[in-house]
Amino acid sequence: MNKIYISFLAALAIMLLGSCNDFLEEDPTDRLTVDKAITSRSELFLNCVANLYRDVGGSSNAQGLQGTSHGLYDLNTFDTDEAMVPTRGADWYDGGYWQALYTHDFSQADGTGDVWNYLFRQVLACNVSLKRIADFAATHPGENVDEYIAEVRGLRAMYMFYAMDLYGRLPIFDSPTPSASQLALQPRSKVYQYIIDELLAIEPQLSIKSSCLPGEYYGRFTKPVALFLLAKLALNVEVYNDDDWTDDLRPNGSQFFFTLYGNKLNAWEAVVYICDYLSNLGFRMEDDFSTNFAVHNEVSRENIFVIPMDKLLYDSQFVNLFRSRHYNHAAALGLNGENGPCATREALMAFGLFEGQAIDAEDVDPRFALTYYCGQVYDLNGNIITLDDGTPLVYEPWKVALDVSGTPWEKTAGARMRKYEIDPTATMDGRHSDNDIVLMRMADVVLMKAEALLRNGDDGSEPFNEVRERVSAKPMECTLATVLDERQRELAWEGWRRNDLIRFGLFTRAYSDRPQLPGESNGYTTVFPIPGEFLNFTRCSQNPGW
Amino acid sequence: MSRTIIKRWCRIAACIAALLPLALPIHAANEEADSVISVGYTNTNNAVSGSVEHVGQDQMNRKQSSNALDAINGRVAGMTVQRPSNGLAAMNAVRVRGTTSLTGGNDPLIIVDGVFGDLTTLSAIYPADIESFTVLKDASETAQYGSRGASGVIEVTTKRGTSSTAGMSYNGTFGVSRVAKNINMLDADAYRQLLTQQSLMLVDHGYNTNWQREIQQTGFQQDHHIAFTGGKANAGYRVALGYMNHRGVILHESMNNFTSNMSMHQTMFNDRVKVEVGMFGNVQHSTTSIYDVQKTFYSAASWNPTFSTERNAAGGWDGFTYANQINHPMALMDSRTRNKTTHLSTHGKISAQITTDWSLSGFLAFSHNEAEASQFLPTSIWAHGQVYKGSNKTESLVGNIMLAWDKSMASHHVKIMALAEAQRDDLTGFGVTTTNLSTDALGIDVLQAGALTVWDGTKSFHKTPTMAAFMSRGSWEWNDRYSLTITARIDGSSKFGKNHKWGFFPSASAAWTVSNENFMRDIQWLETMKLRVGVGMAGNQGGIDSYMSLNALQPVGIVPVGQGAAVSLGLPLNINPDLKWEVKCTFNTGIDIVVLNSRLFGSIDFYTSKTTDMLYLYNVPVPPFHYNKLLANIGSMSNNGLEISMGATLVNTRDIDLNINANVAWQRNKLLSLSGEYGDYYLEAPSIVDIGNLNGAGFHGGNNHIVYQIVGQPLGVFYLPHCTGLVDDGNGGYVYGIADLDNDGNIYLANGADRQVCGQAVPKVLVGSNFSLRYRNCDLAIQINGAFGHKIYNGTALTYMNMNSLPGYNVMADAPAMAIKDQIATDYWLEPGDYVNIDYITFGWNVPLKKSAIERLRLSLTLENLATITSYSGLTPMINSTNVSSTLGIDDKNTYPVTRDVTLGVSVYF
């Protein structure tokens, strides 16, 4: 009896265990395995190319190239002489983050590594897409997927560009699942060359269409975007080819050569060439500066690359206006505000302002009123905006300081961001507006041309004054110093200030409320520290100084 | 390892498991134990050799409780019940022997009459329906339940009808609850005076409002319970209905719960076949005006006290833009969150005695759980307003077949059983959020009042996790002195990677009843002395979701495509194809002693456990990973502790009974490692990871981390800069002086040099004690609980003492005198969390009745939460000191007001 039972039980156990393997298989009905998700060319585009654009903008901290808090934009802006986030009493201390950013004490600014994670997640996503496109091509021999491959490689090069600009040394890898050794950090010059090579290799296969106008290429990585990036790379050639940025020596840009459409050009000539090429493609400065930042700015022929915004469709956010304006200012617009970021004293001076002078004075650059809210402000119907106690709200641009707590202008110090047209129908407190966020535009290219001409020993005044004329500013002598100031006036709040200051060697200097850090003169703060988790994993060394 | 090898190993293991018990020596004996208690799948007697605590009617808390767990709170050594701190329908957090997993699955398994459930299942059980609790603590006992029981098991047995208990009973409770303590903020006059004196902007609406009081009300409760029982010799039934209606101490807060419980049993064929059928269920409605606990209490404490509690002329609430992190407290009270949970569970069991020794039983249970949630956030507190409705449903089918052999031969008694079990859950849910309301008047019921439904405002899902298990358990007793139990269990879960679905978890325990030895028979005063020892392994899969090992794409967002836009697919997180069982190995040893005619009894248990292959959301590098969190099996953690329970019957006469029970538990936890191999990668997670931060104005991001997880330390330690004292800032204020701990001349607030570990958030010692006294028909019971050895971060005081937060945010009454103008988080506000709390005092009177239709009548009066003895300066030290989450050990403007409750109870038996 027992024996029979034992063998019965053993047999039963073995049988059940076998059939249980099927019982324990997961077969989800609310998601798709890759083979089911990519069965056609249109699905390949949707889930391997178009999906990558979802993360150009972001909806939470540190995500997206611009528009969220603690992200790439903040690392390129709030550590410069252009803008700061003062501590305002109980508001905006935030564990010392903003003060650490402003003073370049980046290792104290908790969360700068999140930007690295964001950028490399995009690089990995591009690698995954490239692998899936290759897999698709292998099983669908008739389909030409070259254009998709070019577009994804272009996007990857763009993220690598932003990452190189912030962190200097980067890993270069094609695998979606790289090993630790494949992720070894490469010198900055090698990363630079990789990005250049990638862009030049794929650029011929890209569409020449603007990615800022509605249509098939809206929001996408097209040839003008690749060219813009090539111009930026060429203009910063001395910085990006400097593998030891703490030795005070930089290579000479005129000694670096590019071959563009069969023309061998040095770096400065390449910038000029690209500017002219983009003009020929139809990119031009809009007659009205404000067109580029309007609620419906997807008509601009000037914008080259944007984060498409649509409160009904996308979840990308734009916090730049929301977090800058005063609570009552926002409330008067029917929105919300966080009363934070504002212009520094240096930014005010760049516009020709000095303390006590009216902002509509003749010497003040016309773009100041288009870029900043200053003094008394009005709602959309022209009524004066007041504080809760009934007194008018007056922004005090010159009272700005890194910590204004306890001062009478704790809540009102500093000129606030304007630039983008107010979208009164914005949702999420004003974070979801319809203005596309401008990442790259032609005025920047024109100023790059002026600068390149100067650096090549030529006269840059024509493109330089073209930018000034558009806003009816008086012509001015074109020198490297005036170009940098002009870039501040033209491109304020657009996320290029750090890049510009480093190129001009002025990033590490002392300015208002920012004494130079000990040892900073060697330039170690021009790159950010690389996240410790990554260094632990690859056993690579940290950037010098951090 | 390849799949086939694993399969083969599993099969071999299954065979061994099935055969092992049969190999044990068998002799004959025939002795029936009289104290049969139900442990696990089988009935057992004093052969229990693991760590098991049985709490019968007499040992349960004597207050009338609306929550089943209140009945055993403080009664079981090593078990903590964290009171719900945020509202009426909130769930308790329960830990048996502390936290052993980082991911989840730390809540014990709840089994109600054989039906597996979780803490939410208990809301379907009216406490008066409970016959007994059995708490299984160590692995040799919980092993029977495999992975589900890895964090302890609480078995709840409900009352059943028998021929001797025929009758009817009514239990009623009526109570009042009032707020006993609020935070002492500046009143309106002091606020005005201070702002004027400091020439800060004063927005004075001319009122004197105590906001904390304004959002509060007197709470009421009434509970009714009626039960009918009856039976014959071979059958019995019991039907019980319960209704609870509670009104909370915060405006608009209410809960009602309807429960029912029915059970029947019958024996047939000369008692050889027994059929048991049961059904229990409930419908619970709860409503609250608290959509965000912290925002509500933060606003009530610090909103401008000169504002009116009434709407303004325009019909809205006056705003105060400087206080942009908080809202008008009365505007917050306009928000509504409504939850409805429906639970239905039916189960049936048929057991057959095939021969004298062999028995076979089958059990099948189906449960249905539905949670509906609605929320309305008016335009005054949420830009453009928001309405949400959603529903989550879980249907669960569990079945098992068990074959058992039970034989007594001479002085031996052997029991062997084999069990196969399968479970399939079906989880579905959806939710819709709409915004841009044109009117607040439509409130919570109308989704289409919102003009906008954004893409990520709609969600739905469907998951079907499955589990399967095979178990064999054998126990052997000899001479009433020695017993040995061996369990082998194979668990399979669908949630793990393709090659890791199965886990083998054996356990064994032994006991020696020393007092039954011949050489001990002469010691008259010693009634029982039993030594126990047990070891075991348990797998854990709690807290992890389905499809975490599957490379499957889901909709992640909308992208522009061509002229329009389309939803694209992607992976929003790292997947791990190698996900596998987390394993906990436990060793337990204990002694039970009963002396002096059961007047005095005590037990001591020591345990140590180690969790390996620890499931956790590890911080991983990007690249190679896409996201910086990965659910993986890498690290390890240890737990150990000592538990002592004692009881004494000091007086036991016809007129007077006096009993004292007490238990003490020491617990120690250590995070051993977060590093290890993952596939081809060696992953070294940062050894210092923050888990709890401060929130509120000026606390966004940055170095606001308070509680950390540090390798080599207990879970949840405070890692803070050291404050050397308050330093004059030269402007009539003070800032926190910060020590340069590494003497490098710089103060570095980020993780590293100038921070130090300065205490743990989880208590080192837990104490529960109960005194009960009966004098004739009157009785008195007092329960006192305490916790020691931990600390609490008083983030509430850090915020409300900062004079810089004026004029937007009101400050504490003491703030002007201390003149602190700083909110850097240092150890200045880290305080000892030790406390002793008088949980309740109950006076009862069994009304003497002579020859009445009423068999028994009892009246009782309970005072709950009578007093707390503590040095902690905040509202209450009874915050979350148990559950490893972002609120662990941090009191940050989110503490529910402390209440005192008085309840009157009536019990009538007919």
Image (cartoon, coloured by chain):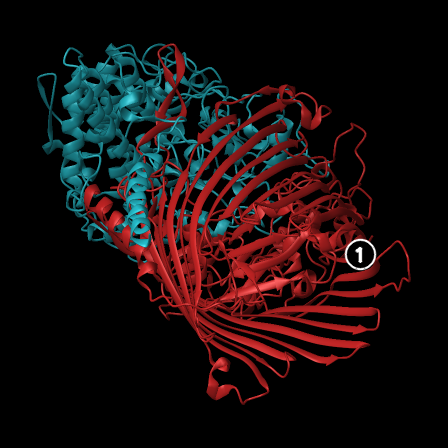
Q: Secondary structure at mark 1?
A: strand
**Which amino acid, mark 1?**
Thr
Q: From the viewer's side, name the closer residue of A274 and A33.
A: A33
In the rendered structure, the answer to whether residue B609 lies left or right of residue B47 reads left
Q: Residue B298: x, y in percent?
A: 65, 48
Q: From the viewer's side, name the closer residue of A546 and B626.
A: B626
User: Within 10 angstroms of label 1, few (less than 14), some, or many (20 or more) residues?
Assistant: many
Q: Which residue is mark 1?
A: B903
Q: Residue A216: x, y in percent?
A: 33, 11
In the rendered structure, the answer to whether residue B1 lies left or right of residue B512 reads left
In the rendering, what colour is chain A? cyan
Any part of residue A513 in sight: no
In the rendered structure, the answer to whether residue B354 lies left or right of residue B793 reads left
Q: From the viewer's side, name the closer residue of B223 and A242.
A: B223
In the rendering, what colour is chain B? red
Any part of residue A541 in sight: yes
Please, is residue B512 above or below residue A312 in the view? below
Q: Kindly identify which chain the residue marked by label 1 belongs to.
A: B
